[in-house]
Image (cartoon, helix red, strand yellow):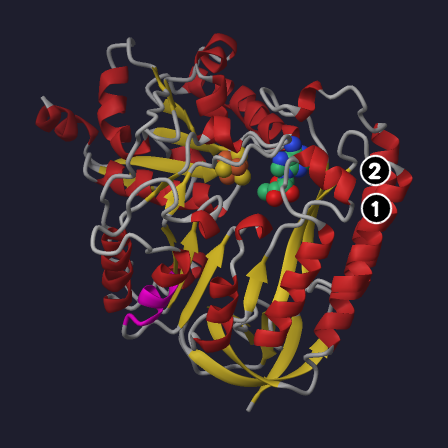
Amino acid sequence: MIYEYMKHMENKQFFIKTFGCQMNQRDSEIMAQSLSRFGYVEGMDIKDADLIILNTCSIRAKAEQKVMSLLGYLRKTKEKRPDMKICVAGCVAQQEGKSIIDRMPHVDLIIGTQNIYQIGEYLLAAEDGKHRVVTQMEDNYQIPRFLPNIPFSADSADAEKAAFQFSRFVTIMQGCNNYCTYCVVPYTRGREVSRMAKDIVDEVTLLVQSGVKEITLLGQNVNSYGRTNEVCPDNSSYNFSKLLRQVSSIEGLERLRFTTSNPKDLTDELIACFKDVDNLCPQFHLPVQSGSDNVLKAMNRKYSIAQYLQQVEKLREYCPTIALSTDMIIGFPGETDEDFEATMELLEKVKFHGSFSFKYSDRPGTRSSEFDNKVDETIKSERLARFQSRQDEISLERNEEFVGQEKQIMVEAIYEDSVKGRTATHHIVHVKGQVNTKVGAMLKVKINFAGQHSLKAELI
Ligand code: 5AD
Ligand code: SF4
């Protein structure tokens, strides 16, 4: 039966649009690889696609609205090409399930976050019109053992694809048990589960052997890796720091990164890795979410600003060149002027290299969506604008510290008259001129100009 179906699907094109986080990007890669077993090839243009997958994000209302409007637009495309299939995957699919099809009957398949590995099989089942919603979540879910495709050939014409051969994400855990009051993740990605250490090491080894130079270990809360299930049968005290050290020692791996971390689980053992793990990049994204202890309490974050500042101090003591970035939610229910001033003070104290800041947004099922002390939209917008404009100034100050320094960049894209690369601290660097190099190569450069969002440099 599957063979018949594969023949029928041969040479069909799929197009995936990914919203949201790196976890979702990795999930899109997994779906792409799973579909290739069913004769599908990835197309570059939504217009030619026989199958369109929207891999969705529900972290903020805005992200979800974008998906819904794109689905509305696809209704007309489907009228013109009724054979084309539309699949909604990811966090919105998980949370909304059948109600998406009720509103958008032209959608063929809804596939939840724990079901993506079998997307091909579910497409087959959806053909009879019965299995159109697959969103089971298991309490004792285990992330399947899944080895990656070998990256594409070195001279891929598409710049993003070419860079992708040298820098890859590897999922180490998924789900979350923290229940921050604003966050949908426990509802969209389920209980926290960690992958077996051996599977992760095998995956990274395979990638590095096939030319990958940079790996980012991914999870909603990587610091609690291995806490809810056994990950290494020979070592019951195996944890994220040990995984980081083991992965870092894989021969040929030049750059190692990880995301995302929760300050409440950040240990001294992990901070120490920044001091003595050579290929661990001096870059750390440590979302704080607010500068006020009152707000952190209402968010159920389980750390204080004093503790956060101690961690920052220790990180900088162990690794003076570390670039710190954060996430900030502005206008959480109950956030007073004083609370917001505390957030602005935190900016001055830490001087983050960069930050992602968002207006608080009610999400279905979360505790904070029931809170009755919501902040007025105009106040939220004003506070966000003030926060972002100060952060921009600080980012520029931080970037200016690089001017005159020599850095190694990994080449991400080559253009006719310039090259784009990234420092170990994750800063984008543009080098002007015709440079004889390859994507993935390491170049030594001297930074000679700092902008707010990127640096310029000359070759050494
Ligand atoms: N409203 C606004 N921002 C949110 N985030 C998570 N949930 C919400 C919400 N309900 C932000 C947090 C998180 C980032 C990925 O998105 O800052 O770290
Ligand atoms: Fe969006 Fe969170 Fe889901 Fe990632 S895990 S896609 S950020 S809702």
Between 32 and 256, the one lying in front of the other is: 256
Q: Quadrant of residue 131?
A: top left
Please report the bounds of the magenta region as a residue range.
244-250
- Contact flag, marks 1 and 2 (Cβ < 8 Å): yes
Give the residue type that dot 1 points to.
Ala
Image: 226 above or below 335: below
Identify the image quadrant of the N terminus: top left
Residue 206 in the image, given as x and y percentages of width and height: 23, 61
Classify residue 285 as left or right of residue 436.
Answer: right
Q: Quadrant of residue 165?
A: bottom left
Give the residue type that dot 2 points to.
Ser
- Residue drawn at (68%, 87%) of the image: 404
**Structural distance between the alpha carbons of marks 1 and 2:** 6 Å
Q: Disc 1 designates what residue? A: 385
Image: 156 above or below 380: below
Label tally: 2
Residue 45 in the image, given as x and y percentages of width and height: 43, 40
Q: Is mark 1 within 8 Å of ligand 1?
A: no
Provide the major secondary structure of the magenta segment. Answer: helix
